Image (cartoon, rainbow, N blue to C red):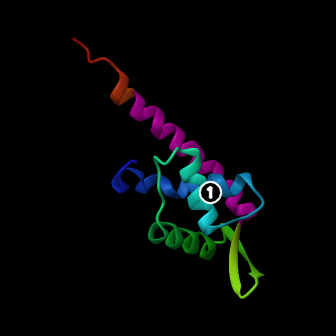
């Protein structure tokens, strides 16, 4: 598993990318999907996830829908039109960042 310090800056792009791939997702589902597709290398805690979700909701990037399941309420997050634009921007930014890191870590030093 990667350290929290290493993954902290990538959580927003990860969350937007996952939600943009589906109609809607709820918090626990997001954490489990990330864990599954990364083979457990990235583990998003509730303490890291929900502040990001709430911030994105307040910015109009995500919309919410409450679904009642018995006595429990599940809050689903879906991406808005502005959110889709934001997802493209942050995806391009993270891909560029990864390419830059690749140059730093995988280029042989000049002799």
> Which residue corresponds to the image point at 53% horizontal and 58% vertical from the top-left?
12
Highlighted range, magenta? 78-102
Q: Nearer the viewer, residue 62 or 19?
A: 19
In the image, residue 35 above or below residue 104:
below
**x and y, in percent, of residue 45 in the image:** 46, 65
Quarter of the rendering containing residue 75: bottom right
Quarter of the rendering containing residue 30: bottom right
In the image, residue 38 above or below residue 111:
below
- The residue beneath circle 1 is 16
Binning the other alpha carbons within 10 Å of mark 1 as few (below 14), some (14 to 19) or many (20 upward) gives many
Horizontal side, residue 105 vs residue 64: left or right? left
In the image, residue 15 above or below residue 46:
above
Location of the C terminus (image quadrant): top left
Quarter of the rendering containing residue 15: bottom right
**x and y, in percent, of residue 68 in the image:** 76, 83
In the image, residue 41 above or below residue 78:
above
> Which residue corresponds to the image point at 53% horizontal and 72% vertical from the top-left?
50
> Which residue corresponds to the image point at 59% horizontal and 45% vertical from the top-left?
37
Kindly report the secondary structure that dominates the magenta region of the rendered protein: helix
**x and y, in percent, of residue 110 in the image:** 26, 14
Name the outermost residue toward the top: 111
Name the outermost residue toward the bottom: 71
Horizontal side, residue 6 vs residue 83: left or right? left
Label 1 sits on a secondary structure element that is helix
**x and y, in percent, of residue 104 in the image:** 34, 30
Q: Nearer the viewer, residue 32 or 90?
A: 32
Q: Nearer the viewer, residue 24 or 96?
A: 24
Name the outermost residue toward the front: 70
């Amino acid at each position: 598993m990667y350290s929290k310090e290493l993954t902290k800056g990538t959580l927003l792009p990860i969350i937007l990318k996952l939600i943009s791939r589906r109609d809607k997702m709820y918090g626990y589902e997001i954490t489990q999907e990330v864990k599954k597709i990364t083979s457990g290398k990235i583990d998003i805690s509730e303490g890291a996830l929900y502040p990001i979700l709430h911030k994105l909701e307040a910015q109009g990037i995500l919309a919410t829908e409450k679904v009642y399941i018995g006595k429990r309420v599940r809050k689903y997050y879906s991406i808005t039109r502005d959110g889709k634009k934001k997802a493209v921007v942050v995806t391009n930014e993270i891909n560029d960042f990864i390419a830059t890191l690749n140059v730093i870590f995988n280029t042989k030093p000049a002799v």
